[in-house]
Image (tube, coloured by chain):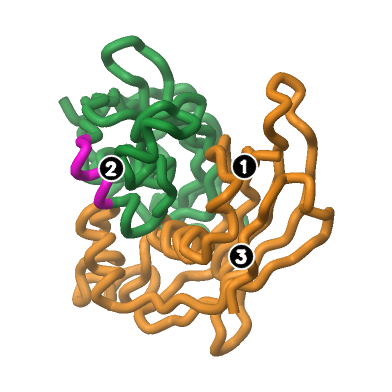
Chain colours: A orange, B green
C-alpha cells in the first residue's frame, strides 16, 4: 500500500499525490497521549468528557497530528531524502473519537530549490487525515520540508 | 511561577503575556517520542544522527510542540475556559538537542467574540519555546482557541 521511497527532491511533481493507508486512533492511545501532553478533561477523563463541549472523549489535536504524520514517516517515503522540516499550518476541522480510523494521504503543493544550499529543495506537502467511516476530514496540514536532491 | 487560571475569555487583553517556567527535553523523552511518532534517524538513532544533517540527535518538531504546549496546559491556565482549538501555525527556527531547557511563554495576539456561539470567544495566542542557555527561539506557534465567556 505504501508508496516507494523518494530518491531525490527532483523526482517530485506538483500535484503528485500519495496514499499511505489508514491509522486507528484507539481509546488507549488517546488517553495516553492526553495524559502526557494535553491533560484537558475532554482528552483524559471519560466522565468529564461526556459532560463537556464534545459530548465525549476526543483525541488531542497534537495526537492526531503526531499519529497521522508518524504513519506517513513510517512508510519510509522520505527516509532517503528528509533533511527535516521548517514549519506547519494545521487545521483540525472535526474532532477525532476513540476507534476512528483515518485515511492518510498527501499531495505536493509547491516545489522550489534552496537558494542557499544546492544539496536540497524545499517542498510544501499537504497531508490529510480523513475518517474512513464517513469521509469527514479531521486533519489538514501544509508542511514545509527540506529534501535532498 | 504559573499564572492563575483564566476565568473568562472576556478578561483577556491584547498584548497580555504569560510565563510558564521551563520544560526540559531529555534524551530519553526525545528517543521515546521519535520511536513512536517520528522515526527518522536524526530523532531515534544516535550513531546515524551523528553522521546526519544535524550532527547529532535532535527532538522531533512534533515532540517540541507537544512538550511546550503540554507544559502550558499543565499550568491550568485554560482549564476553566478551554473549548478546544481550531488550528496552529508552527515554526521550528532551530533544532532542539538532548538536555535543552526551554522557557515557555505566551502572548495574546487577537481576540474576537464568536459570531455563531455567544458562549465563547476566539483567541489567537502565540506561544514560544526559547532555549534558556542561549536565548535562541526553537518553537513559535500561533494557535487559535475557543474560550468560554
As rendered, which of A99 and A21 lies closer to the eye?
A21
Residue at the image point whose x is 41% and y is 53% from the top: B38
As rendered, which of A19 and A98 lies closer to the eye?
A19
Q: Is A32 displayed left or right of A5 in the figure?
A: left
What is the magenta range?
Answer: B26-32
Task: Give me the C-alpha separation between circle 1 and circle 2.
Answer: 20 Å
The residue furthest left is B1
Q: Residues within 10 Å of mark 2 (few under 14, many from 20)?
A: many
What secondary structure is the stretch in magenta mostly built from? helix
The residue furthest bottom is A133
Image vertical order of residue B55 relative to residue A86, above or below: above
The residue furthest right is A14
Image vertical order of residue B129 relative to residue B46, above or below: above
- Badges 3 and 1, same chain: yes
Query: What is the x, y in percent for residue B80?
Result: 26, 51
Inspect the magenta stretch and tell me whether residue B27 lies in it.
yes
Q: Nearer the viewer, mark 3 or mark 1?
A: 1
Image vertical order of residue A18 relative to residue B89, above or below: below
Q: Residue at label 1?
A: A145
Q: Residue at label 2?
A: B30
Q: Residues within 10 Å of mark 1 (few under 14, many from 20)?
A: many
Q: Residue at label 3?
A: A128
Amino acid at each position: 500500500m505504501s508508496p516507494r521511497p523518494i530518491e531525490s527532491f527532483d523526482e517530485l511533481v506538483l500535484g503528485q499525490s500519495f496514499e499511505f493507508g489508514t491509522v486507528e486512533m484507539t481509546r488507549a492511545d488517546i488517553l495516553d497521549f492526553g495524559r502526557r501532553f494535553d491533560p484537558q478533561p475532554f482528552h483524559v477523563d471519560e466522565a468529564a468528557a461526556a459532560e463537556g463541549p464534545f459530548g465525549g472523549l476526543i483525541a488531542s489535536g497534537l495526537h492526531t497530528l503526531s499519529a497521522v504524520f508518524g504513519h506517513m514517516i513510517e512508510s519510509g517515503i522520505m527516509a532517503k531524502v528528509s533533511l527535516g522540516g521548517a514549519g506547519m499550518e494545521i487545521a483540525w476541522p472535526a474532532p477525532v473519537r476513540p476507534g476512528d480510523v483515518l485515511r492518510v494521504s498527501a499531495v505536493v503543493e509547491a516545489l522550489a530549490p534552496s537558494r542557499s544550499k544546492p544539496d536540497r529543495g524545499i517542498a510544501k506537502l499537504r497531508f490529510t487525515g480523513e475518517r474512513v467511516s464517513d469521509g469527514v476530514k479531521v486533519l489538514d496540514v501544509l508542511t514545509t520540508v527540506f529534501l535532498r536532491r
